[in-house]
Image (cartoon, rainbow, N blue to C red):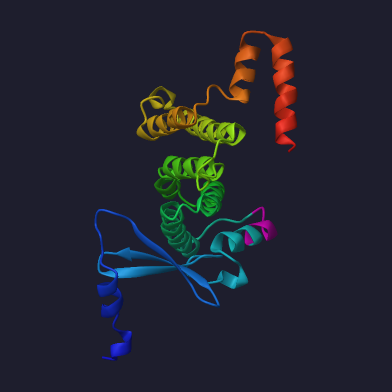
Amino acid sequence: MDNKQIIDDILEQWPFDPMNINVRLLESSQRKVLQMRVDMGVLQLETEGRPDGIKPNNANSYYEFLKKKADLDETTFELDDDDCLEIDREFVQFYHRRVCWLQLKEFGNAVKDADHTLGLMDFCKEFSPDENWTISHEQYRPFVLYHRTQAAALSRLDEDDEDFDDQGAVELAIEEVNTGLEQLRELFVEYEAEEQFDEDELVERLVEFREGLRTKYDVGPTLKERLEAAIEKEDYESAARMRDELTKRNSL
């Protein structure tokens, strides 16, 4: 056996910690890679394109390749067994990389990879050859939405700045959580489980996260929340002022 193929030195220099997610970003003059230490080994992931670095049929991902293929054959396109296998591989790869980005607090990249996964899930629902196969992926949609919502909210905050006090940014972070919660509610409605929404663990975590932001940064109801409350109370004059302010803020 060629000693160059044995990775004992890497494993010894980077011990596996079963109680934590072990991730690092390595950079050379030519490329960046993510590495995740797992039990008895190391996963290495590219930071751009597909995590394994492969370009399926010269596309940046198998999802991108399938979208082009479906566009050319809109009427009869359906996923076959080989497509399903490659999709499953891609789901797993993007999950690992999303976890890496979250651990490294690279929240914008985590949002990007979550969006890829959610888009691929939508594609699977539309062109799936088997309902059970679709459900096997759809069961993870709430978890992906949970990750995306957290990452999108945290990406709004510049917590590296010790003097951070931008109330507008905090409000945007809270609104990201509200948007994620609404998307989760729509999902529960779609699957006729709305009565379980408030007791769902992921929903409870996001609500706790949102209220934690309010407490940490001493922020009350957001401008959008106040607008919705004014409309509900039929206070249309106040609602008009807040709508103008919200439009102005969104244009900045």
In front here: 159 or 203?
159
Residue at the far bottom: name it: 2
- Residue 128 appears at what percent x and percent y? 51, 51
Q: Quadrant of residue 29?
A: bottom right
Q: Is residue 55 left or right of residue 5?
A: right
Residue 53 in view (yes/no): no
Asked if residue 56 shows in the view, the reply is: yes
Q: Is residue 70 magenta?
A: yes
**In this rendering, is residue 107 above or below 225?**
below
Residue drawn at x 63%, y 62% is 69
| Residue 88 x %, y % | 43, 59
Q: Which quadrant of the rendered structure holds the N terminus?
A: bottom left
Measured along the vertical axis of the image, is residue 125 above or below residue 248? Answer: below
Residue 212 appears left or right of 172: left
Picture coordinates of residue 222 (x, y %)?
Answer: 58, 25
Span highlighted in magenta in the image: 69-75
Q: Residue furthest front?
A: 163
Q: Quadrant of residue 231?
A: top right
Q: Nearer the viewer, residue 161 or 247?
A: 161
Q: Is residue 86 magenta?
A: no
Against 159, is 51 above or below? below
Can you give x and y, in whole percent of width and height, for residue 90 in the image? 47, 61
